Amino acid sequence: MDILHYEDIIAAAAEVGFDLCGVVDAEPMPHPKEQFERWLAEGNQGTLGYLERNVDKRFDPSLLVEGARSVIVCALAYGVPQESANCSEGRRAKIAPYACREDYHTVFRRLLTQLAERLRLNERGIRWRAFTDSAPLAEKSLAERAGIGRRGRNSLIINSRFGSRILLGELVVCAPADRYSTPTAENPCSDCGACVERCPAEAILPEGGIDTRRCIACRTVEPAATPSDESTAGWLFGCDECQACCPCNEAAERRDNQLIATLFNPADLSADYWVEITDEEFAERFGTTPLSRAGAERLREGAKKL
Ligand code: SF4
Ligand code: SF4
């Protein structure tokens, strides 16, 4: 059987432009699965029913891709748009920094395909599939195993160099590698509690994890989120509070990978702008960003409540 060479994978991922890469075997992950099932049993998924489906697949990549032997986990680091003086009047509409750029699903699909090409997987007859937040795959657990980072109290993967502002994607490959990454020994999260204190929705659970029924990021992004009349604390799409306050991000290297460059600065745009935006302008200006998943109407309605 054809074997992937670890060093080749890491070099190819860097050539494609990823900031981080690790490789893990595609074995089942029983411990994270148990934690996830406990989280589900407490009802923290709310109305996000898709989280309840395919739990076995989520923690066993070989059930998702038949014959899977390895998972290549890649990450891109992104920055935060600067404060702007352009929006001097009116209410602000806050948008999470990851959403102010090309949709990461599109970017990862492109880059992971390039990675598969560099590794000549098709020529070698090795089957593969690329994922980013697009299938039941426990990407945070895989990222931890791959040494990308460790899960912080805010439930995000924190990398010791780039902090938590990283996006993840995976190439599931039907061939073993000659060696695999190891998890990082130290968790950058000091358990300082700043994220818990700062979270406007009290969504960070004491025993770890997020209550999606409360979390503003879930409520403003997920189409199937639990309906709620509670405030979004000025957030129109996503929420960055538990990252903005995290000392790991304060100390992190400021990296804004230009493969996923910023397309607009939300600080330039008032809530009134969003209330009045036409479908045409929305499609033209934001059609390639993650905002397109919510659509113009949802943002207009959200902006009225800010
Ligand atoms: S704010 Fe503190 S507790 Fe929260 S993730 Fe960052 S380091 Fe951990
Ligand atoms: S994204 Fe916002 S609402 Fe959700 S846990 Fe973090 S701070 Fe709380």
Image (spheres, helix red, strand yellow):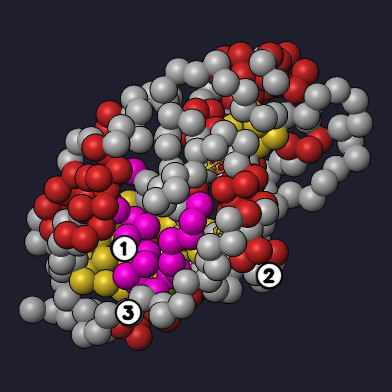
Query: Does label 3 or label 2 sit earlier along the sequence?
Result: 3
Q: Amino acid at mark 1?
A: Leu
Q: Whole-Å distance between the Cαs marked 2 and 1?
A: 25 Å
Q: Nearer the viewer, mark 2 or mark 1?
A: 2
Left or right of 27 in this view: 108: right
Quadrant into which the N terminus falls: bottom left
Front position in the image: 255 or 36:
36
Query: Does label 2 or label 1 sit earlier along the sequence?
Result: 1
The circle drawn on residue 251 is 2
Rate crowding at label 3 as few (under 14), some (14 to 19) or many (20 or more) other CA atoms within 10 Å: some
Q: Which image quadrant is residue 118 in?
A: bottom left
Decide: is 91 above or below 267: above
Q: Residue at x 37, y 67 (%)?
A: 144
Disc 3 residue lies near ligand 1 with CB under 8 A? no
Quadrant into which the C terminus falls: top right
Q: Which residues lie in the magenta part?
A: 134-154
The circle drawn on residue 181 is 3
Rate crowding at label 2 as few (under 14), some (14 to 19) or many (20 or more) other CA atoms within 10 Å: few
Left or right of 244 in this view: 292: left
Front position in the image: 5 or 23:
23
Q: Secondary structure at mark 1?
A: helix
The circle drawn on residue 142 is 1
**Image quadrant of ligand 1?**
bottom right
Tally of numbered discs = 3
Decide: is 298 above or below 39: above
Q: Amino acid at mark 3?
A: Ser
Q: From this viewpoint, is residue 33 visible? A: yes
Query: Does label 1 or label 3 sit earlier along the sequence?
Result: 1
Q: Nearer the viewer, mark 3 or mark 2?
A: 2
Q: From this viewpoint, is residue 240 visible? A: no
Residue 12 in picture, x, y percent from top left: 41, 76
Q: Secondary structure at mark 3?
A: loop
